[in-house]
């Protein structure tokens, strides 16, 4: 048997001693220190099911459903008016370019280029506007009467008012500019505003109508 040099023998002996000591220490029973509880976590799904069942039993679920239906009905019957809109005070006309600029290349499913980034596209070239757009405040009877009386084909868009109530009263469709998206798009500030086509542009005409709240304006029935 080959003998180890003194230094290597001492190192090996020390390693064995440490290993034996560690084994003994890890096996020693140190007893219990402090209170011990079982780890328990609530079942989230069961918690939710229990809460839902409690809501059904107490009638709270039915109340919440009724309130949701009422809120939806109220929103449809009387949507929030578009902010920043006032009655027209004078007749003014401007042209609006509906073209939009493509931000990046638009490709077909087969990879063919439909429109290159930076291209300006006028939607009137593909989808001509065949009806006038009448933007009105449905809370002003004079504006409603003006829109109803127009003989040319038109679409009535409310920026305020109760569309379903007006539909029932006049027997024709009234749309609502939810969130004011169209008003922002066409930069509308007053009602009534008449929008029709002029070549590749939209002509926007602000039409003042006189009533008790807007007396002295340049009344117009056209």
Image (cartoon, grey):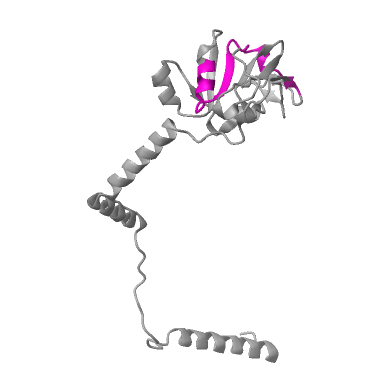
Q: Would you place residue 153 above or below residue 89 in this image?
A: above
Res 88 visible: yes
The front one of 200 and 152 is: 152
Q: Which image quarter holds the N terminus?
A: bottom right
Name the residue at 37% across, 71% down.
Answer: 39
Q: Is residue 14 left or right of residue 97?
A: left
Q: Quadrant of residue 6?
A: bottom right
Name the residue at 42% across, 31% down.
Answer: 77
Res 5 visible: no
Q: Residue furthest right?
A: 118
Where is residue 51 shown, x and y percent of the image?
Answer: 30, 55
Name the residue at 28% across, 45% down.
Answer: 62
Residue 60 colored in magenta in the image: no
Name the residue at 24% across, 53% down.
Answer: 58
Q: Residue furthest left?
A: 57
Where is residue 187 shown, x and y percent of the image?
Answer: 67, 28
Q: Would you place residue 4 above or below residue 65 in this image?
A: below
Where is residue 66 shown, x and y percent of the image?
Answer: 31, 41
The front one of 59 and 157 is: 157
The front one of 69 and 154 is: 154
Residue 142 colored in magenta in the image: yes
Q: Quadrant of residue 172?
A: top left
Q: Which image quarter holds the C terminus?
A: top right
Q: Quadrant of residue 47?
A: bottom left
Q: Would you place residue 208 above or below residue 126 in this image?
A: below
- Give the residues in magenta: 119-147
The front one of 16 and 142 is: 142
């Amino acid at each position: 048997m080959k003998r180890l040099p003194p230094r290597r023998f001492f190192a090996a002996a020390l390693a064995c001693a440490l290993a034996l000591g560690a084994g003994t220490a890890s096996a020693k029973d140190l007893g219990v220190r402090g209170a011990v509880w079982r780890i328990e976590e609530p079942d989230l799904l069961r918690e939710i099911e229990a809460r839902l069942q409690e809501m059904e039993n107490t009638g709270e679920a039915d109340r919440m459903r009724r309130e949701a239906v009422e809120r939806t009905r109220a929103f449809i019957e009387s949507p929030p008016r578009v902010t920043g809109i006032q009655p027209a005070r004078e007749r003014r006309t401007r042209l609006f370019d509906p073209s939009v600029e493509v931000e990046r290349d638009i490709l077909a499913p087969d990879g063919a280029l439909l429109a290159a980034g930076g291209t300006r596209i006028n939607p009137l070239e593909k989808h001509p506007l065949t009806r006038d757009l009448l933007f009105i405040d449905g809370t002003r009877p004079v504006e409603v009467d003006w829109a109803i009386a127009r003989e040319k084909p038109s679409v009535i868009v409310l920026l305020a008012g109760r569309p379903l109530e007006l539909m029932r009263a006049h027997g024709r469709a009234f749309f609502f500019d939810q969130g004011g998206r169209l008003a922002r798009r066409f930069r509308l500030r007053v009602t009534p505003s008449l929008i029709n086509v002029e070549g590749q542009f939209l002509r926007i005409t602000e039409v003042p109508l006189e009533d008790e709240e807007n007396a002295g304006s340049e009344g117009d029935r056209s």
